[in-house]
Image (spheres, rainbow, N blue to C red):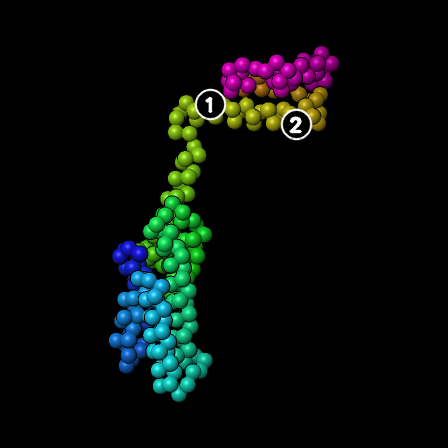
Amino acid sequence: MSSRFQLRIHQALLRSSTFRPTHIRSTPQQLTPHLRGLATSSTNMASAQSTTGGVISETARAEGGPSKGSTAAEMQSQASRTQNFEQAVQEVGAKMQNDPASVSSEDAAYLKSREARVIGQGQPPADSISAEAQRLASATKEARKSSRQPSDPTEQSANDRVSNFEAVADDVARKMASNPASVTKDEADLLHSREQRAFGNTSKGGIASQAQSIAAENEKKGAI
């Protein structure tokens, strides 16, 4: 994993209150290698977890045994949250480094949730690894959205004309099916115009032609 990601993880863990040296009193030196080794590999993480377990055990013995609300209990809870964060970093961080375009909003939210629990804040800082994951996910989403949109103005204009025709065609088709007597000449003419603009011509026997025939019959009958 790159040094940039290592720094992000290191910063997240330094923000964790339980793992600050002031909470360990007599053993701050034992936490330093733990923090330094977290982001390097699964092997180093396993070693760090073992070191942390030893610190927690020593703290529990110093307190006369584990008990709810004790420093050792708080440390154990934080250690579990940290381990979950490490797992998320391994999963999402690999994608961030090797295939940034594959980082999804779900990945970013998953990492943010795990990091927020470690640092005790609902919103990790802007320079956090989860914030970087969110930026990658947002960039990928925007890129995919742009790729689906025509870059050629002429193509975009043609698509707009087709959409305009389809919108009118849907409305008129519903009236033709449910209440043909309500189809007006204005509606039929508008549909004919939209079809002509969208495709350059009108289809003989198509919906615009049918609508005009129905509208003409309605006018003869005085239905509208």
Judging depth in this view, the residue of 193 and 93 nearest the camera is: 93
Residue at position x 33%, y 51% in the image: 97
Does 209 appear in magenta? yes
Most frequent secondary structure within the magenta stretch? helix
Q: CA distance from mark 2 to mark 1?
A: 25 Å
| Image x and y of residue 89, in percent | 37, 59
Q: Position of residue 192 (x, y in %)?
A: 57, 17
Categorize mark 1 by other alpha carbons within 10 Å: few (<14), some (14-19), many (20+): some
Please provide percent x and percent y for residue 76.
Answer: 41, 75
Tell me the element at label 1.
Answer: helix
Helix, strand or loop status at disc 2: helix
Numbered range of the magenta stretch: 195-224
* Residue at the front extreme of this rendering: 43
- Residue nearest the viewer, comparing 39 with 81: 39
User: Residue 220: x, y in percent?
Assistant: 71, 12
Q: Amino acid at mark 2?
A: Arg
User: Is 44 part of what is drawn in magenta?
Assistant: no
* Residue tagged 2: 174
Which image quarter holds the C terminus?
A: top right
Task: Examine the rendering and report whether any part of residue 148 can be seen.
Answer: yes
* Quadrant including the N terminus: bottom left
Residue at 36% over, 47% down: 100
| Residue contact between numbered discs 2 and 1, judged by CB atoms under 8 Å | no
Task: Using residue 27 as the reference point, say whether residue 195 is left or right of it.
Answer: right
User: Three-letter amino acid code at disc 1?
Assistant: Ala
Disc 1 target residue: 158
The quarter of the displayed image where residue 141 is located: top left
